[in-house]
Amino acid sequence: MSKQLSEMTLQELWKLFPIFLVEPKDEWKKWYEEEAHHICDILPGEKIVQINHIGSTAIPGIWAKNIVDILLEVPAPGDLPEVKNQLMEHGWLCMSQSDSRISLNKGYTPEGFAQRVFHLHLRISGDHDEIYFRNYLIQNPSVAKEYEKLKLSLWKNYEHDRDGYTQAKGDFIRKYTEIAKEEGRLL
């Protein structure tokens, strides 16, 4: 019998769920739309400020992990635990949380990735730098291709080190997020 995810060490989880990139898939947009609709059916409307498709799967034409990232903003810090609990009742797993952010996922199993995998970033309204970054890359395909090239160069070195992979992309992401904010690229 295999271990439950909650019983595994970080190293065991990284081995079971390695970093791997795939060519762009048209279905990512559909996966996002279906899952966003499902989330909206679960939660009361007043608990959702906005919901967005973020991450590389939201950027047309670039390689990405086959994981759809969703950013869900709630009105206030006090809404985070209630929303988290409601989502967990519908199959989401809490991976980490602080006073102002909660990360949940869906599609991780003791046998590995399911066919559809999601990361849900639960945030307080206004905490959405990822939208600036996404929009900048969508509006600047050459920068999106630079990002793709960076990710492809890091992939194998960080295949079993998700934190290292994220940190190695950090300077690039911060740089273009700041440029997008200066240019007002939220919309």
Image: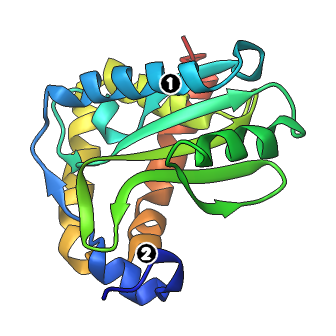
Q: Amino acid at mark 1?
A: Asn
Most distant residue in the front direction:
1
Most distant residue in the left direction:
23
Check if mark 1's residue and mark 2's residue have beta carbons within 8 Å. no
Q: Is residue 144 left or right of residue 13?
A: left
Residue 150 on image: x %, y %: 26, 56
Q: Amino acid at mark 2?
A: Gly
Q: Is residue 99 above or below residue 130?
A: below
Residue at 29 percent of width and 82 percent of height: 15
Q: Is residue 61 left or right of residue 118?
A: left
**Figure disc tally:** 2
Q: Residues within 10 Å of mark 2 (few under 14, many from 20)?
A: some
Residue at 54 percent of width and 17 percent of height: 185
Q: Earlier in the sequence, mark 1 or mark 2?
A: 1
Residue at 44 percent of width and 33 percent of height: 54
Residue 160 on image: x %, y %: 31, 80
Q: Nearer the viewer, residue 53 or 81?
A: 81
Q: Is residue 160 visible to the viewer in this orientation of the structure? A: no
Marking on residue 52: 1
Q: Is residue 46 left or right of residue 29?
A: right
The residue under label 2 is 164
Q: Is residue 182 above or below residue 96?
A: above
Residue at 45 percent of width and 76 percent of height: 5
Q: Is residue 16 left or right of residue 85?
A: left
